[in-house]
Image (cartoon, rainbow, N blue to C red):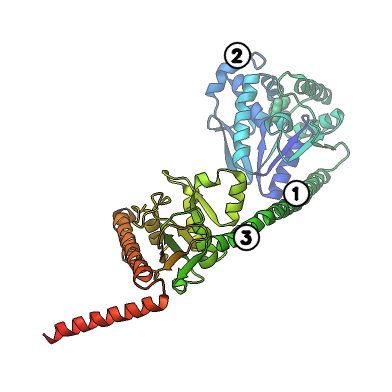
Amino acid sequence: MINIAIDGPSGAGKSTIAKIVAKTLGITYLDTGAMYRAVALHVVNCGKNPSVEEDVTPLLSDINITYIKDNDENKICLNGKDVSQDIRRHEISKCASEVSKIPAVRLFLVDMQRKIADSSDVVLDGRDITSYVLPNAKYKFYLTAKDTERAKRRFEELKAKGQEVSYEQILADVKDRDFNDMNRDFAPLKKTEDSFEIDSTDMSLQQVVDTILTKIKEIDEKNSAKTQEKNVNTQVIKKVKDRKKQRGRWFYKGLANFARKVLRVLWITKIYFKENFPKNTKALVICNHYSGFDPCVIMSRIMGKDSKVVMKNEIVANSFIDKVSKELGCIPVKRGEADVTAVKSIMGALNNNQPVLIFPEGTRNRQKTKELLPFKQGVATFAIKAKAPIVPMIYYKKTVIFGRNKLMVGKPFYLDEFYDKKLNDVREVATQYIFDKMQELRKEIDILVENCKGSKKKYLEYKKNQSKELSSDVGDGRKE
Ligand code: DC
Protein backbone atom coordinates (compact mmCIF):
# COMPACT_ATOMS: atom_id res chain seq x y z
CA MET A 1 0.00 0.00 0.00
CA ILE A 2 1.16 3.55 -0.67
CA ASN A 3 1.10 5.47 2.63
CA ILE A 4 2.23 9.08 2.61
CA ALA A 5 2.47 10.51 6.13
CA ILE A 6 2.50 14.26 6.70
CA ASP A 7 2.84 15.77 10.19
CA GLY A 8 3.21 19.32 11.32
CA PRO A 9 1.76 22.05 13.56
CA SER A 10 -1.67 23.52 12.92
CA GLY A 11 -1.95 26.05 10.16
CA ALA A 12 1.13 24.81 8.26
CA GLY A 13 -1.05 24.00 5.26
CA LYS A 14 -0.96 20.23 5.69
CA SER A 15 -4.53 19.47 4.71
CA THR A 16 -4.55 21.67 1.59
CA ILE A 17 -1.20 20.23 0.44
CA ALA A 18 -2.15 16.63 1.32
CA LYS A 19 -5.39 16.95 -0.67
CA ILE A 20 -3.51 18.10 -3.79
CA VAL A 21 -0.84 15.40 -3.44
CA ALA A 22 -3.55 12.73 -3.05
CA LYS A 23 -5.43 14.03 -6.07
CA THR A 24 -2.26 14.17 -8.18
CA LEU A 25 -1.41 10.57 -7.29
CA GLY A 26 -5.03 9.41 -7.57
CA ILE A 27 -5.21 8.11 -4.01
CA THR A 28 -7.33 8.81 -0.92
CA TYR A 29 -6.80 11.70 1.48
CA LEU A 30 -7.41 11.16 5.18
CA ASP A 31 -7.55 14.25 7.41
CA THR A 32 -6.87 12.78 10.85
CA GLY A 33 -7.29 16.18 12.51
CA ALA A 34 -10.92 16.10 11.34
CA MET A 35 -11.39 12.91 13.35
CA TYR A 36 -10.21 14.62 16.58
CA ARG A 37 -12.44 17.53 15.71
CA ALA A 38 -15.43 15.19 15.27
CA VAL A 39 -14.81 13.68 18.70
CA ALA A 40 -14.51 17.19 20.17
CA LEU A 41 -17.77 18.24 18.51
CA HIS A 42 -19.58 15.25 19.95
CA VAL A 43 -18.23 16.04 23.42
CA VAL A 44 -19.33 19.68 23.12
CA ASN A 45 -22.74 18.62 21.74
CA CYS A 46 -23.18 16.38 24.77
CA GLY A 47 -22.46 19.34 27.02
CA LYS A 48 -19.33 17.74 28.47
CA ASN A 49 -15.88 19.19 29.13
CA PRO A 50 -13.31 18.22 26.43
CA SER A 51 -10.41 18.55 28.86
CA VAL A 52 -11.87 16.13 31.42
CA GLU A 53 -10.87 12.57 30.64
CA GLU A 54 -13.69 11.05 32.74
CA ASP A 55 -16.21 13.08 30.75
CA VAL A 56 -14.83 12.21 27.34
CA THR A 57 -13.90 8.52 27.55
CA PRO A 58 -17.43 7.14 28.19
CA LEU A 59 -18.68 9.01 25.12
CA LEU A 60 -16.32 7.22 22.73
CA SER A 61 -18.53 4.15 22.45
CA ASP A 62 -21.33 6.38 21.06
CA ILE A 63 -19.13 7.80 18.32
CA ASN A 64 -19.27 6.47 14.77
CA ILE A 65 -17.09 8.27 12.24
CA THR A 66 -17.66 7.59 8.54
CA TYR A 67 -16.93 9.29 5.23
CA ILE A 68 -19.07 10.05 2.21
CA LYS A 69 -17.77 11.09 -1.15
CA ASP A 70 -19.15 14.40 -2.35
CA ASN A 71 -17.87 15.35 -5.80
CA ASP A 72 -14.13 14.97 -5.29
CA GLU A 73 -14.22 15.50 -1.53
CA ASN A 74 -14.52 13.15 1.40
CA LYS A 75 -17.08 14.54 3.82
CA ILE A 76 -16.78 13.43 7.44
CA CYS A 77 -19.90 12.15 9.17
CA LEU A 78 -20.46 11.91 12.91
CA ASN A 79 -23.06 9.26 13.66
CA GLY A 80 -24.37 9.52 10.13
CA LYS A 81 -24.52 13.37 10.01
CA ASP A 82 -22.23 15.39 7.76
CA VAL A 83 -20.23 17.58 10.15
CA SER A 84 -17.55 18.80 7.70
CA GLN A 85 -18.51 22.44 8.31
CA ASP A 86 -19.28 22.23 12.02
CA ILE A 87 -15.91 20.82 13.00
CA ARG A 88 -14.12 23.83 11.48
CA ARG A 89 -15.66 26.21 13.97
CA HIS A 90 -12.98 28.19 15.81
CA GLU A 91 -13.96 26.97 19.30
CA ILE A 92 -13.88 23.36 18.12
CA SER A 93 -10.18 23.73 17.16
CA LYS A 94 -9.29 24.34 20.79
CA CYS A 95 -11.52 21.51 22.02
CA ALA A 96 -9.95 19.13 19.49
CA SER A 97 -6.55 19.93 20.89
CA GLU A 98 -7.88 19.13 24.35
CA VAL A 99 -9.48 15.78 23.51
CA SER A 100 -6.37 14.80 21.56
CA LYS A 101 -4.45 14.71 24.85
CA ILE A 102 -6.60 11.85 26.15
CA PRO A 103 -4.93 8.46 25.46
CA ALA A 104 -8.27 6.60 25.05
CA VAL A 105 -9.29 9.08 22.32
CA ARG A 106 -5.98 8.65 20.52
CA LEU A 107 -6.09 4.83 20.68
CA PHE A 108 -9.68 4.87 19.41
CA LEU A 109 -8.79 7.02 16.40
CA VAL A 110 -5.32 5.55 15.70
CA ASP A 111 -6.90 2.10 15.37
CA MET A 112 -9.28 3.46 12.69
CA GLN A 113 -6.45 5.29 10.91
CA ARG A 114 -4.20 2.20 10.76
CA LYS A 115 -7.05 0.09 9.38
CA ILE A 116 -7.67 2.64 6.61
CA ALA A 117 -3.93 2.85 5.79
CA ASP A 118 -3.68 -0.94 5.75
CA SER A 119 -6.42 -1.34 3.21
CA SER A 120 -5.92 1.59 0.85
CA ASP A 121 -3.36 3.89 -0.76
CA VAL A 122 -3.68 7.04 1.27
CA VAL A 123 -2.15 10.39 2.20
CA LEU A 124 -2.64 11.04 5.93
CA ASP A 125 -1.96 14.28 7.70
CA GLY A 126 -1.87 14.96 11.42
CA ARG A 127 0.51 15.23 14.38
CA ASP A 128 1.61 11.67 15.14
CA ILE A 129 1.35 9.90 11.77
CA THR A 130 5.09 9.65 11.13
CA SER A 131 5.97 8.88 14.75
CA TYR A 132 3.14 6.76 16.08
CA VAL A 133 0.40 5.81 13.61
CA LEU A 134 2.59 4.69 10.70
CA PRO A 135 6.23 4.72 11.85
CA ASN A 136 7.13 2.42 8.93
CA ALA A 137 5.59 4.54 6.19
CA LYS A 138 7.85 4.84 3.16
CA TYR A 139 7.16 8.54 2.62
CA LYS A 140 7.28 10.82 5.65
CA PHE A 141 7.10 14.61 5.71
CA TYR A 142 7.17 17.28 8.41
CA LEU A 143 5.49 20.40 7.15
CA THR A 144 5.96 23.54 9.19
CA ALA A 145 5.96 27.38 8.99
CA LYS A 146 6.60 30.28 11.38
CA ASP A 147 3.76 30.67 13.91
CA THR A 148 3.12 34.25 12.80
CA GLU A 149 2.74 33.12 9.22
CA ARG A 150 0.42 30.27 10.27
CA ALA A 151 -1.68 32.66 12.35
CA LYS A 152 -1.88 35.08 9.40
CA ARG A 153 -3.09 32.31 7.07
CA ARG A 154 -5.71 31.15 9.59
CA PHE A 155 -6.88 34.71 10.21
CA GLU A 156 -7.41 35.30 6.49
CA GLU A 157 -9.19 31.98 6.10
CA LEU A 158 -11.66 32.74 8.90
CA LYS A 159 -12.17 36.31 7.69
CA ALA A 160 -13.05 34.98 4.25
CA LYS A 161 -15.65 32.73 5.90
CA GLY A 162 -17.08 35.76 7.70
CA GLN A 163 -15.93 34.74 11.20
CA GLU A 164 -15.03 37.60 13.52
CA VAL A 165 -11.72 36.94 15.31
CA SER A 166 -8.66 39.06 15.98
CA TYR A 167 -5.23 38.19 14.60
CA GLU A 168 -3.72 38.44 18.10
CA GLN A 169 -6.28 35.99 19.41
CA ILE A 170 -5.52 33.56 16.59
CA LEU A 171 -1.77 33.85 17.13
CA ALA A 172 -2.26 33.17 20.84
CA ASP A 173 -4.41 30.14 19.98
CA VAL A 174 -1.82 28.85 17.49
CA LYS A 175 0.90 29.10 20.12
CA ASP A 176 -1.34 27.48 22.67
CA ARG A 177 -2.16 24.55 20.38
CA ASP A 178 1.49 24.11 19.39
CA PHE A 179 2.37 23.84 23.04
CA ASN A 180 -0.44 21.37 23.71
CA ASP A 181 0.34 19.22 20.66
CA MET A 182 4.08 19.17 21.27
CA ASN A 183 3.99 18.60 25.00
CA ARG A 184 1.26 16.08 25.65
CA ASP A 185 2.41 12.79 27.18
CA PHE A 186 0.96 10.45 24.60
CA ALA A 187 2.23 10.59 20.98
CA PRO A 188 3.14 14.31 20.92
CA LEU A 189 3.89 16.18 17.72
CA LYS A 190 7.57 15.90 16.81
CA LYS A 191 9.70 15.66 13.72
CA THR A 192 11.02 12.13 13.33
CA GLU A 193 14.58 11.71 12.05
CA ASP A 194 13.44 10.03 8.87
CA SER A 195 10.87 12.69 7.96
CA PHE A 196 11.66 15.21 5.25
CA GLU A 197 11.14 18.72 6.67
CA ILE A 198 9.60 21.46 4.58
CA ASP A 199 9.30 25.00 5.95
CA SER A 200 6.54 26.62 3.94
CA THR A 201 6.83 30.14 5.42
CA ASP A 202 8.12 31.60 2.17
CA MET A 203 6.88 28.99 -0.23
CA SER A 204 3.82 28.94 -2.46
CA LEU A 205 1.36 26.09 -2.28
CA GLN A 206 2.55 24.71 -5.62
CA GLN A 207 6.19 24.86 -4.52
CA VAL A 208 5.38 22.75 -1.45
CA VAL A 209 3.40 20.23 -3.53
CA ASP A 210 6.22 19.97 -6.07
CA THR A 211 8.80 19.49 -3.30
CA ILE A 212 6.76 16.61 -1.87
CA LEU A 213 6.20 14.94 -5.26
CA THR A 214 9.90 15.26 -6.17
CA LYS A 215 10.91 13.75 -2.85
CA ILE A 216 8.50 10.82 -3.35
CA LYS A 217 10.06 10.18 -6.78
CA GLU A 218 13.54 10.38 -5.26
CA ILE A 219 12.65 7.87 -2.52
CA ASP A 220 11.21 5.52 -5.15
CA GLU A 221 14.33 5.76 -7.30
CA LYS A 222 16.59 5.20 -4.31
CA ASN A 223 14.56 2.19 -3.27
CA SER A 224 14.54 0.66 -6.71
CA ALA A 225 18.34 1.17 -6.96
CA LYS A 226 18.67 -0.47 -3.54
CA THR A 227 16.48 -3.39 -4.60
CA GLN A 228 18.52 -3.79 -7.78
CA GLU A 229 21.75 -3.68 -5.78
CA LYS A 230 20.28 -6.19 -3.33
CA ASN A 231 19.26 -8.45 -6.22
CA VAL A 232 22.74 -8.24 -7.73
CA ASN A 233 24.26 -8.99 -4.30
CA THR A 234 21.97 -11.98 -3.79
CA GLN A 235 22.85 -13.23 -7.25
CA VAL A 236 26.57 -12.88 -6.54
CA ILE A 237 26.24 -14.66 -3.18
CA LYS A 238 24.22 -17.42 -4.84
CA LYS A 239 26.84 -17.81 -7.57
CA VAL A 240 29.65 -18.06 -5.01
CA LYS A 241 27.64 -20.58 -2.99
CA ASP A 242 26.82 -22.59 -6.12
CA ARG A 243 30.47 -22.58 -7.14
CA LYS A 244 31.48 -23.77 -3.67
CA LYS A 245 28.82 -26.44 -3.75
CA GLN A 246 29.89 -27.42 -7.25
CA ARG A 247 33.52 -27.58 -6.10
CA GLY A 248 32.45 -29.85 -3.22
CA ARG A 249 30.41 -31.92 -5.63
CA TRP A 250 33.37 -32.72 -7.84
CA PHE A 251 34.92 -34.63 -4.99
CA TYR A 252 31.86 -36.75 -4.35
CA LYS A 253 31.17 -37.11 -8.07
CA GLY A 254 34.71 -38.43 -8.50
CA LEU A 255 34.23 -40.89 -5.67
CA ALA A 256 30.93 -42.04 -7.13
CA ASN A 257 32.52 -42.62 -10.56
CA PHE A 258 35.37 -44.48 -8.94
CA ALA A 259 32.91 -46.67 -6.99
CA ARG A 260 31.04 -47.48 -10.21
CA LYS A 261 34.22 -48.51 -12.00
CA VAL A 262 35.56 -50.61 -9.15
CA LEU A 263 32.26 -52.39 -8.69
CA ARG A 264 32.05 -53.23 -12.38
CA VAL A 265 35.31 -55.05 -11.97
CA LEU A 266 34.64 -56.66 -8.60
CA TRP A 267 30.99 -57.48 -9.12
CA ILE A 268 31.49 -59.33 -12.37
CA THR A 269 28.10 -59.79 -13.96
CA LYS A 270 26.98 -61.28 -17.23
CA ILE A 271 23.97 -59.43 -18.49
CA TYR A 272 21.50 -61.13 -20.83
CA PHE A 273 19.19 -59.21 -23.14
CA LYS A 274 20.50 -55.77 -22.22
CA GLU A 275 18.89 -54.62 -25.47
CA ASN A 276 15.46 -54.99 -23.83
CA PHE A 277 16.20 -51.90 -21.76
CA PRO A 278 14.39 -48.93 -23.34
CA LYS A 279 16.68 -45.95 -23.95
CA ASN A 280 15.94 -42.26 -23.40
CA THR A 281 12.66 -42.75 -21.65
CA LYS A 282 11.24 -42.99 -18.20
CA ALA A 283 11.08 -46.50 -16.79
CA LEU A 284 10.62 -48.30 -13.51
CA VAL A 285 13.33 -50.89 -13.33
CA ILE A 286 12.66 -53.74 -10.90
CA CYS A 287 14.96 -56.51 -9.77
CA ASN A 288 15.37 -59.12 -7.07
CA HIS A 289 17.85 -57.96 -4.46
CA TYR A 290 20.74 -59.72 -2.77
CA SER A 291 23.55 -57.24 -2.20
CA GLY A 292 23.92 -53.54 -1.61
CA PHE A 293 26.29 -53.49 -4.61
CA ASP A 294 23.64 -54.77 -7.08
CA PRO A 295 22.26 -51.31 -7.84
CA CYS A 296 25.68 -49.97 -8.83
CA VAL A 297 26.07 -52.68 -11.43
CA ILE A 298 22.55 -52.32 -12.81
CA MET A 299 22.74 -48.55 -12.93
CA SER A 300 26.20 -48.14 -14.39
CA ARG A 301 26.03 -51.00 -16.90
CA ILE A 302 22.40 -50.83 -18.00
CA MET A 303 20.55 -47.76 -16.90
CA GLY A 304 23.14 -45.03 -17.51
CA LYS A 305 24.45 -42.10 -15.45
CA ASP A 306 21.15 -40.25 -15.31
CA SER A 307 19.40 -43.04 -13.49
CA LYS A 308 18.03 -43.10 -9.96
CA VAL A 309 17.68 -45.80 -7.35
CA VAL A 310 15.35 -45.93 -4.39
CA MET A 311 17.23 -46.96 -1.25
CA LYS A 312 16.27 -47.26 2.37
CA ASN A 313 16.93 -44.08 4.32
CA GLU A 314 19.18 -45.77 6.93
CA ILE A 315 21.90 -46.30 4.33
CA VAL A 316 22.44 -42.57 3.92
CA ALA A 317 22.30 -41.66 7.61
CA ASN A 318 25.98 -40.72 7.45
CA SER A 319 26.55 -37.39 5.68
CA PHE A 320 29.61 -38.60 3.72
CA ILE A 321 27.74 -41.63 2.35
CA ASP A 322 24.73 -39.43 1.77
CA LYS A 323 26.77 -37.14 -0.49
CA VAL A 324 28.38 -39.98 -2.45
CA SER A 325 25.08 -41.82 -2.79
CA LYS A 326 23.39 -38.65 -4.05
CA GLU A 327 25.99 -38.57 -6.85
CA LEU A 328 25.20 -42.20 -7.48
CA GLY A 329 21.55 -41.22 -7.99
CA CYS A 330 20.19 -42.47 -4.71
CA ILE A 331 16.70 -41.44 -3.58
CA PRO A 332 16.48 -42.24 0.14
CA VAL A 333 13.09 -43.38 1.36
CA LYS A 334 11.82 -43.65 4.92
CA ARG A 335 10.31 -47.07 5.19
CA GLY A 336 7.00 -47.73 6.89
CA GLU A 337 5.65 -44.19 6.37
CA ALA A 338 4.38 -41.97 3.58
CA ASP A 339 7.63 -40.24 2.59
CA VAL A 340 6.35 -37.31 0.57
CA THR A 341 9.84 -36.06 -0.36
CA ALA A 342 10.81 -39.45 -1.75
CA VAL A 343 7.53 -39.76 -3.67
CA LYS A 344 8.11 -36.32 -5.18
CA SER A 345 11.70 -37.20 -6.15
CA ILE A 346 10.64 -40.47 -7.78
CA MET A 347 7.78 -38.88 -9.73
CA GLY A 348 10.06 -35.97 -10.61
CA ALA A 349 12.70 -38.29 -12.05
CA LEU A 350 10.12 -40.28 -14.05
CA ASN A 351 8.52 -37.13 -15.41
CA ASN A 352 12.02 -36.03 -16.36
CA ASN A 353 12.39 -39.20 -18.44
CA GLN A 354 14.90 -40.75 -16.07
CA PRO A 355 14.82 -44.47 -15.26
CA VAL A 356 14.29 -45.35 -11.60
CA LEU A 357 15.42 -48.61 -10.03
CA ILE A 358 13.25 -50.00 -7.24
CA PHE A 359 13.58 -53.31 -5.48
CA PRO A 360 9.94 -54.37 -5.13
CA GLU A 361 10.73 -56.85 -2.35
CA GLY A 362 11.54 -53.77 -0.25
CA THR A 363 14.65 -55.31 1.25
CA ARG A 364 17.55 -57.62 0.47
CA ASN A 365 16.84 -61.35 0.36
CA ARG A 366 18.89 -62.32 3.39
CA GLN A 367 18.21 -66.04 3.03
CA LYS A 368 19.70 -65.70 -0.47
CA THR A 369 16.99 -67.97 -1.87
CA LYS A 370 15.97 -67.96 -5.53
CA GLU A 371 12.32 -67.46 -4.57
CA LEU A 372 11.01 -63.92 -4.71
CA LEU A 373 9.87 -62.34 -1.47
CA PRO A 374 6.39 -60.73 -1.42
CA PHE A 375 6.28 -57.40 -3.27
CA LYS A 376 5.51 -53.99 -1.79
CA GLN A 377 2.92 -51.90 -3.65
CA GLY A 378 5.08 -48.88 -4.48
CA VAL A 379 6.12 -50.00 -7.97
CA ALA A 380 2.50 -50.45 -9.08
CA THR A 381 1.63 -47.01 -7.71
CA PHE A 382 4.43 -45.21 -9.54
CA ALA A 383 4.01 -47.18 -12.78
CA ILE A 384 0.32 -46.30 -12.91
CA LYS A 385 0.70 -42.69 -11.78
CA ALA A 386 3.56 -41.92 -14.19
CA LYS A 387 2.26 -44.24 -16.93
CA ALA A 388 5.79 -45.61 -17.05
CA PRO A 389 6.90 -48.94 -18.48
CA ILE A 390 8.24 -51.51 -16.02
CA VAL A 391 11.48 -53.25 -16.95
CA PRO A 392 11.85 -56.53 -15.05
CA MET A 393 15.32 -57.90 -14.24
CA ILE A 394 16.30 -61.05 -12.38
CA TYR A 395 19.58 -62.12 -10.86
CA TYR A 396 19.91 -65.86 -11.30
CA LYS A 397 21.03 -66.33 -7.71
CA LYS A 398 22.72 -64.43 -4.90
CA THR A 399 25.37 -62.06 -6.17
CA VAL A 400 28.95 -62.31 -4.92
CA ILE A 401 32.27 -60.54 -5.37
CA PHE A 402 34.34 -61.96 -8.23
CA GLY A 403 31.46 -64.37 -8.84
CA ARG A 404 29.94 -65.24 -12.18
CA ASN A 405 26.82 -63.27 -11.50
CA LYS A 406 24.07 -63.51 -14.10
CA LEU A 407 21.33 -61.02 -14.74
CA MET A 408 18.52 -61.23 -17.26
CA VAL A 409 16.65 -58.17 -18.55
CA GLY A 410 13.02 -58.91 -19.48
CA LYS A 411 10.76 -57.15 -21.97
CA PRO A 412 9.25 -53.90 -20.67
CA PHE A 413 5.53 -53.94 -19.95
CA TYR A 414 2.92 -51.33 -19.02
CA LEU A 415 0.11 -51.41 -16.49
CA ASP A 416 -2.15 -49.62 -18.98
CA GLU A 417 -5.21 -51.72 -18.18
CA PHE A 418 -5.21 -50.06 -14.72
CA TYR A 419 -4.67 -46.44 -15.79
CA ASP A 420 -8.34 -45.43 -15.81
CA LYS A 421 -9.17 -47.24 -12.55
CA LYS A 422 -9.05 -45.92 -9.00
CA LEU A 423 -5.52 -46.54 -7.70
CA ASN A 424 -6.69 -47.82 -4.33
CA ASP A 425 -8.88 -50.43 -6.04
CA VAL A 426 -6.16 -51.82 -8.33
CA ARG A 427 -2.91 -51.46 -6.41
CA GLU A 428 -3.02 -54.98 -5.05
CA VAL A 429 -3.98 -56.75 -8.27
CA ALA A 430 -1.45 -54.67 -10.23
CA THR A 431 1.25 -55.70 -7.76
CA GLN A 432 0.29 -59.35 -8.23
CA TYR A 433 0.51 -58.82 -12.01
CA ILE A 434 4.05 -57.44 -11.63
CA PHE A 435 4.98 -60.34 -9.35
CA ASP A 436 3.73 -62.85 -11.94
CA LYS A 437 5.79 -61.15 -14.66
CA MET A 438 8.89 -61.48 -12.49
CA GLN A 439 8.10 -65.14 -11.83
CA GLU A 440 7.93 -65.70 -15.61
CA LEU A 441 11.33 -64.06 -15.98
CA ARG A 442 12.68 -66.16 -13.12
CA LYS A 443 11.65 -69.30 -15.10
CA GLU A 444 13.39 -67.98 -18.20
CA ILE A 445 16.72 -67.28 -16.49
CA ASP A 446 16.53 -70.72 -14.90
CA ILE A 447 16.11 -72.24 -18.36
CA LEU A 448 18.93 -70.08 -19.73
CA VAL A 449 21.38 -71.05 -17.02
CA GLU A 450 20.32 -74.58 -16.24
CA ASN A 451 19.09 -75.95 -19.61
CA CYS A 452 21.26 -73.87 -21.92
CA LYS A 453 24.48 -73.62 -19.86
CA GLY A 454 24.24 -69.87 -19.70
CA SER A 455 24.51 -69.50 -23.50
CA LYS A 456 22.20 -66.91 -25.04
CA LYS A 457 22.52 -68.64 -28.43
CA LYS A 458 21.42 -71.98 -27.02
CA TYR A 459 18.59 -70.31 -25.13
CA LEU A 460 17.29 -68.67 -28.30
CA GLU A 461 17.42 -71.99 -30.13
CA TYR A 462 15.66 -73.60 -27.20
CA LYS A 463 12.91 -71.02 -27.35
CA LYS A 464 12.60 -71.42 -31.11
CA ASN A 465 12.18 -75.17 -30.81
CA GLN A 466 9.74 -74.71 -27.97
CA SER A 467 7.53 -72.41 -30.02
CA LYS A 468 7.73 -74.81 -33.03
CA GLU A 469 6.57 -77.64 -30.82
CA LEU A 470 3.79 -75.49 -29.51
CA SER A 471 2.58 -74.45 -32.95
CA SER A 472 2.66 -78.04 -34.26
CA ASP A 473 0.65 -79.05 -31.19
CA VAL A 474 -1.89 -76.40 -32.00
CA GLY A 475 -1.84 -77.48 -35.67
CA ASP A 476 -2.60 -81.09 -34.75
CA GLY A 477 -5.47 -79.89 -32.65
CA ARG A 478 -6.95 -78.02 -35.61
CA LYS A 479 -6.78 -81.07 -37.90
CA GLU A 480 -8.85 -83.09 -35.45
O1 DC B 1 -4.97 19.50 11.95
P1 DC B 1 -6.18 20.04 12.83
O2 DC B 1 -6.00 21.44 13.30
O3 DC B 1 -7.46 19.84 12.10
O4 DC B 1 -6.24 19.07 14.15
C1 DC B 1 -7.09 19.31 15.21
C2 DC B 1 -6.44 18.87 16.49
O5 DC B 1 -6.29 17.49 16.50
C3 DC B 1 -5.03 19.43 16.71
O6 DC B 1 -4.99 20.37 17.71
C4 DC B 1 -4.20 18.31 17.11
C5 DC B 1 -5.06 17.11 17.02
N1 DC B 1 -4.47 16.10 16.17
C6 DC B 1 -3.66 15.16 16.77
O7 DC B 1 -3.42 15.25 17.94
N2 DC B 1 -3.17 14.16 16.01
C7 DC B 1 -3.44 14.06 14.72
N3 DC B 1 -2.93 13.04 14.02
C8 DC B 1 -4.24 15.02 14.10
C9 DC B 1 -4.73 16.06 14.86
Q: Earlier in the sequence, mark 3 or mark 1?
A: 1
Foreground mark, 2 or 1, reads: 1
Please give the residue where the numbered disc 2 appears in the rendered image.
55
Q: Is residue 266 left or right of residue 136?
A: left
Q: Give how far across and how far down residue 26 sits, in percent.
A: 67, 49
Instruction: Assess whether mark 3 and mark 2 are in contact (beta carbons under 8 angstroms).
Output: no
The image's mark for residue 470 is none
Q: Amino acid at mark 1?
A: Lys
In terms of sequence position, does the residue under pointer 2 or pointer 1 come before the other?
A: 2
- Compared with 174, 84 (above or below) is below
Q: CA distance from mark 3 to mark 1?
A: 39 Å
Circle 3 is placed at which residue position? 257
Which element is circle 3 on? Answer: helix
Crowdedness near tag 2: few (<14), some (14–19) or many (≥20) residues, C-alpha within 10 Å: some
Q: Dot 1, how many residues are within 10 Å of its Cα: few (below 14), some (14-19), or many (20+)?
A: few
- Of the residues tagged 2 and 3, which is closer to the observer? 3
Image quadrant in which the C terminus is located: bottom left
Whether residue 102 is visible, yes or no, is yes
Quarter of the rendered structure image containing ligand 1? top right
Which tag, 2 or 3, sits closer to the chain's start? 2
In the rendered image, which quarter contains the N terminus?
Answer: top right
Mark seen at residue 230: 1
